[in-house]
Image: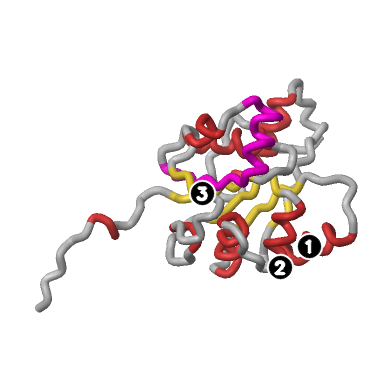
Amino acid sequence: MVAFIENTKYKMNPKKRLIIAMTGATGAVYGVRMLQVLQAQEEWETHLVISSAGVVNLKHEMDMKRAELVALADVTHGIDDIAASISSGGFKTEGMIIAPCSMKTLSAVAHGFGDNLISRSADVVLKERRRLVVMPRETPLNLAHIRNMASVTEMGGIIFPPMPAFYSKSDSMAAMVDETVGRVLELFGVNVEGLYKPWEGL
């Protein structure tokens, strides 16, 4: 009999892993709020990737430094670190959210152009048949944008533009953000109780 020595490095991770990517489109608040919600839940482990344009937008829209964002994540990966754990399908995750997603990143995902860790990780999620949610923020849309959204959908991704709902009669911008964040995280089975009130009809 061969004696196997236990190696703690390869123990199964009891936490569920979720990749949160942020790019240079407007809407940094969505990625930030997702990290805040997940940070409060012990069963989830977040892996953050943010582009250089995303860092600029974070500062502009939220007056927030990269270090403050990194503090919200369990693990942070460099945008050019193609050898990172999340670049491989062998690294188990529940999937990935790109919030917000620029049209450049959407195009890269739609065409399998893994030129950085965000588009590479999205490609991995799709090829492993895991859940990918893309939150594009651009308007109006041209035909290339629409076709790229169609391509990602055909590959199994979910296009989830961060459009506020008015039927809930939210009384603040924060409440509108929470509703969108809650609905997206719910797609991954995250406990979002208290973030928003689901529609129950009139």
Q: CA distance from mark 3 to mark 1?
A: 25 Å
Q: Is residue 200 left or right of residue 131?
A: right
Give the residue at x 58% y 69%: 127
Q: How many marks?
A: 3
Vertical position of residue 69 compared to residue 88: above or below: above
Taking the image as drawn, is residue 38 in sight? yes
* Image quadrant in which the C terminus is located: top right
Q: Position of residue 48 (x, y in %)?
A: 52, 45
Vertical position of residue 83 compared to residue 19: above or below: below
Disc 2 crowd, CA 10 A, few/some/many (<14, 14-19, 20+): some
Q: Position of residue 19 (x, y in %)?
A: 53, 50
The image's mark for residue 148 is 1
Q: Position of residue 89 (x, y in %)?
A: 48, 66
Sequence-wise, which precedes: disc 1 or disc 2?
Answer: 2
Question: Mark 1 touching mark 2, by CB under 8 A?
Answer: yes
Q: Which residue is mark 3?
A: 78
Q: Which residues are magenta?
A: 43-63
Q: Amino acid at mark 1?
A: Asn
Q: Amino acid at mark 3?
A: Gly
Report the residue that reaches farthest toward the top: 171
Taking the image as drawn, is residue 197 in sight? no
Q: CA distance from mark 2 to mark 3?
A: 22 Å
Disc 1 crowd, CA 10 A, few/some/many (<14, 14-19, 20+): some
Disc 3 crowd, CA 10 A, few/some/many (<14, 14-19, 20+): some
> In the picture, residue 121 is in which quadrant?
bottom right
Q: Which residue is mark 2?
A: 111
Numbered disc 3: secondary structure: loop
Q: Is residue 49 left or right of residue 162?
A: left
Q: Amino acid at mark 2?
A: His
